Amino acid sequence: MSGGDMLDFEIRPNSAPVSAVERAALLANPGFGQVFTDHMVTIRYADGKGWYDPRVEARAPIPMDPASAVLHYAQEIFEGLKAYRTADGSVTMFRPEANAARFVESARRMAMPELPAELFVESLHRLVEIDREWIPEAADASLYLRPFMFASEVFLGVRPAKEYLYCVIASPAGAYFAGGVKPVTVWVSPDYTRAAPGGTGAAKCGGNYAASLSAQAEAIEADCDQVVFLDAVERRYVEELGGMNVFFVYDDGTVVTPPLNGTILPGITRDALLSLATAAGHQVVERPISFAEWQADAESGRLREVFACGTAAVITPIGRVRFPGGEFVIGGGEAGRSTTALRERLVAIQRGEAPDPQGWVRRIL
Ligand code: PLP
Ligand code: COI
């Protein structure tokens, strides 16, 4: 299928949706990734046939043969973005085309078929439309959308599969970290790296997260919220967190973030913040920053603020950094002024409460 001739979705509404009363109870305090809506989108792919059978249907288990390729060699990619309810009752999404483009890039890296961007965006619209009652109203809540695709072909040879299933599920979400926007503590992993040059670090594939879990377990063991990975070659430079990019704010207002070197995920929040920080008058620099420099500048006070950013985390201040044998604090362990201002600015744009000069926001309902 080319991007131009759009497939028609078959809509099969859930015959036993969650009741309004039960839904209201679930939406009161959804946490992150624990509550799911009534529907899902599925689209199938087969070599020689292309994309076919797009559906909106009741969310349900997916029957799988035990020899489905994804279960053995992890040919799987995903995305994450949010739908927001605005003050006037409409619904927005933030830069869905950017997620569509990254999904294509991830697919290429994992030797998977490319889902046309129009079909990706259309699939999100369809799901949000049918499950719109699931979008929470609270100011810090939203409907998290999780598009993903996996190799569904039944075979055990090691080669790119010839059949795939694309799916979108939706999950009402509050703050990613249990403490809300409170500064988090991060763990700098001494043993594990996330991605090597030539590897899959820039792709949003399940395997990257599988490989990060021992390090995340170590972080939790050390009473930290998230793991920070250093580069795989020199074990010196800060790359990113398990599920977030990272920014540093200096006393002269300079904002620094590690460059996109192929081993970190090109975050859409990261990209938006590069523009928003520039627009707010910061000097913005993409350059490698070593762990030694991070520690020295935090201890001297030159480094004032550090924050993590991503769709799930939005902008979350990092107050404390632990590593084997020590720890240091950033900005007295409190959320910094620039972090808070950038967060407020980003959230206001996402929710349609502030001008959107870059045209990032799609009003979808
Ligand atoms: N880095 C990793 C490893 C992630 O999982 C995410 C989350 O998607 C990000 C960075 C931030 O990306 P984005 O801002 O597009 O959500
Ligand atoms: C996201 O922010 O969308 C992610 O996929 C990251 C994960 C920690 C939930």
Image (tube, rainbow, N blue to C red):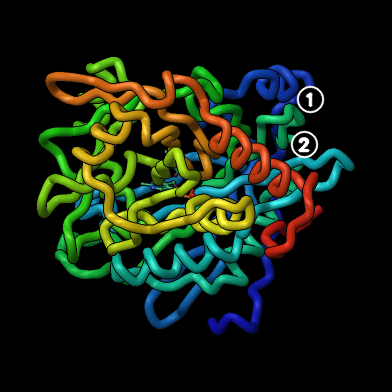
193, above or below 322, in the image: below
Q: Earlier in the sequence, mark 2 or mark 1?
A: 1
Q: Answer few, some or many: residues within 10 Å of disc 1's Cα (few below 14, many 20 plus, some between 14 and 19).
A: few
- Disc 2 versus disc 1: nearer the observer: 2
The amino acid at mark 2 is Glu
Q: Is residue 243 visible?
A: yes
Foreground pick, 81 / 206 = 81
Decide which of 95, 274 is in the foreground and name it.
Answer: 274
Q: Position of residue 38 (x, y in %)?
A: 65, 37
Residue drawn at 30 percent across, 29 percent down? 300
Q: Quadrant of residue 141?
A: top right
Q: Relative to 257, is 17 above or below? A: above
Q: Measure how far apart labels 2 and 1 are at the Cα level.
A: 9 Å
What is the secondary structure assignment of the residue under circle 1? helix
Quadrant placement of the N terminus? bottom right
Residue 133 marker: 2
On the image, the x and y values in percent for residue 278 come to 57, 57
Answer with the quarter of the image where residue 251 lies: top left
Residue depicted at x 60% and y 69%: 119
Say what amino acid the circle numbered 1 marks.
Ala
Give the residue at mark 1: 20
Q: Nearer the viewer, residue 54 or 278?
A: 278
Q: Is residue 322 left or right of residue 33?
A: left
Let me know if residue 148 appears in the view: no
- Taking the view exactly as shown, the residue that stands out farthest to the right is 88
Number of numbered discs: 2
Q: Residue at x 63, y 49 (%)?
A: 57
Left or right: residue 128 compared with residue 277:
right
Q: Are marks 2 and 1 in contact (CB under 8 Å)?
A: yes
